[in-house]
């Protein structure tokens, strides 16, 4: 298209002296000419389950039908040279099955400064389909199971771990729609989470193991052999350790705080000597365990001497003498751990 010349002159139709577009004033131009064109029909293929749209060979996820239609109009719109058209809004009315009558409101901006609001109508034909993600979900497809297991006592922690798995699936799904949860099943000792993509399941299970420690096992089962390719299903077992970070174990008569996990090992800190050590979980599994919320408490400081702090036992209300740690500053209360009748300063 050639660049249109803008000039002052006499309108060929009404005789008014004005800025001319192709020899006509804006008012006459608008009546006589197509300022922009859009197709009469737009065809879309949309997933009936999740609303994803087929574009060429790819499915695009996460758009509203109205936005998708606006985008399509935008990319198929043709304007006269020199005229700039901006879409204001579209109004959609349902016609028959899969049909939408759409009215487009737009504004045409002319280089001479004229602004003309304008409307056009078109029909959108929506073909309903099922995207690969939804057809897999509907068919209960899965490539892997994440098994979250824990000790029966701490159901809350199992649920917390399951929530974390689901959250990670959602995060990964934003970049990979084939990562989804097909099924979530409560079983004895924990939960089974069926995941659409094996790669993602493995990644999440490994993250869980790094975070929580405990046991981690991978197993697989041959499901079918198709065209010489083996189809395997994987199972990732994440067994949560029986305690959580911050809890206490009574080891060699002294409470040790659980500082963290590294695979099958646990980092412990002796509350008296403040010394840290890393031990195999299996070697301390049978020790007495005290959840932090049951044994950590505030104790009132009654008085202090040169070497000792005297506090009130928050349970028995008896006076208890505690060795004053170096550099300790006087305050009204202190945080203590009360394990097995003994009281330790935190
Ligand atoms: Zn005119
Ligand atoms: Zn879908």
Image (spheres, rainbow, N blue to C red):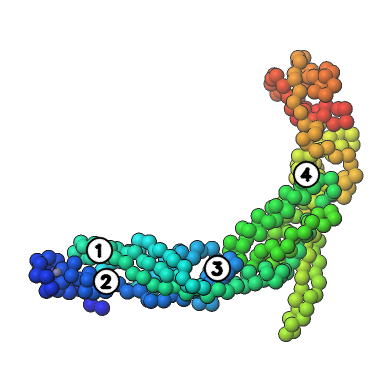
Question: In the rendered structure, are the residues bearing label 2 and label 1 in contact, judged by CB atoms less than 8 Å apart?
Answer: yes
Q: Nearer the viewer, mark 4 or mark 2?
A: 2
Mark toward the viewer: 4 or 3: 3
Write down the residue under mark 2.
Answer: 35
Q: Tag 1's secondary structure?
A: strand
Mark closer to the observer (4, 1)? 1
Q: Left or right: 85 with respect to 258?
A: left
Disc on the earlier residue, 2 or 3: 2
**Of the residues under marks 1 and 3, which one precedes in the sequence?**
3
Contact (CB < 8 A) between labels 4 and 2? no
State which tag comes first along the sequence, 4 or 1: 1
- Looking at the picture, tell me which residue is in the foreground, 250 or 72: 72
Query: Does residue 204 lie above or below 6 as drawn?
Result: above
Q: Which mark is residue 52?
A: 3
Residue ID for mark 1: 116
- What residue is at 68 percent from the left and 69 percent from the top? 138
Q: Position of residue 270 (x, y in %)?
A: 81, 36
Q: Nearer the viewer, residue 244 or 140?
A: 140
Q: Residues within 10 Å of mark 2 (few under 14, many from 20)?
A: many
The numbered mark, 2 or 1, whose residue comes first in the sequence reads 2
Residue 269 placement (x, y as % from top left)? 79, 38
Numbered disc 4: secondary structure:
loop
On residue 244, the disc is 4
Q: Is 340 rendered above or below residue 278?
A: above
Q: Dot 4: within a 10 Å radius of its alpha carbon, few (fewer than 14), some, or many (20 or more) residues? A: some
């Amino acid at each position: 298209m050639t660049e249109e010349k803008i000039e002052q002159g006499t309108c060929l139709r009404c005789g008014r002296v004005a800025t001319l577009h192709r020899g006509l004033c804006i008012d006459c131009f608008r009546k006589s000419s197509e300022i922009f064109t859009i197709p009469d029909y737009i065809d879309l293929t949309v997933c009936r389950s999740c609303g994803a749209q087929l574009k060429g060979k790819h499915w695009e996820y996460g758009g509203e039908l109205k936005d998708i239609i606006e985008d399509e109009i935008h990319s198929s719109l043709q304007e006269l040279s020199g005229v700039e058209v901006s879409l204001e809004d579209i109004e959609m009315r349902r016609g028959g099955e899969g049909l939408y009558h759409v009215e487009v409101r737009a504004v045409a901006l002319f280089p001479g400064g004229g602004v003309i609001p304008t409307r056009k109508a078109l029909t959108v034909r929506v073909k309903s389909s099922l995207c690969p993600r939804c057809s897999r979900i509907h068919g209960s497809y899965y490539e892997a199971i994440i098994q979250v297991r824990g000790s029966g006592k701490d159901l809350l922690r199992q649920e917390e771990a399951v929530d974390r798995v689901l959250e990670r699936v959602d995060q990964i799904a934003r970049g990979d729609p084939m990562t989804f949860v097909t099924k979530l099943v409560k079983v004895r000792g924990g939960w089974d989470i069926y995941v659409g993509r094996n790669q993602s399941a493995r990644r999440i299970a490994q993250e869980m193991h790094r975070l929580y420690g405990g046991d981690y096992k991978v197993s697989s089962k041959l499901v079918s052999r198709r065209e010489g390719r083996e189809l395997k299903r994987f199972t990732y077992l994440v067994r949560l350790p029986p305690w959580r970070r911050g809890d206490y174990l009574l080891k060699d008569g002294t409470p040790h705080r659980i500082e963290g996990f590294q695979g099958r090992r646990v980092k412990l800190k002796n509350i008296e000597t403040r010394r840290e050590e890393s031990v195999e979980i299996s070697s301390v599994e049978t020790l007495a365990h005290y959840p932090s919320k049951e044994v950590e408490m505030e104790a009132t400081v009654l008085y202090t001497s040169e070497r000792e702090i005297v506090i009130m036992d928050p349970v028995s209300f008896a006076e208890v003498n505690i060795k004053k740690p170096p550099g300790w500053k006087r305050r009204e209360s202190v945080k203590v751990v009360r394990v097995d009748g003994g009281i330790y300063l935190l």
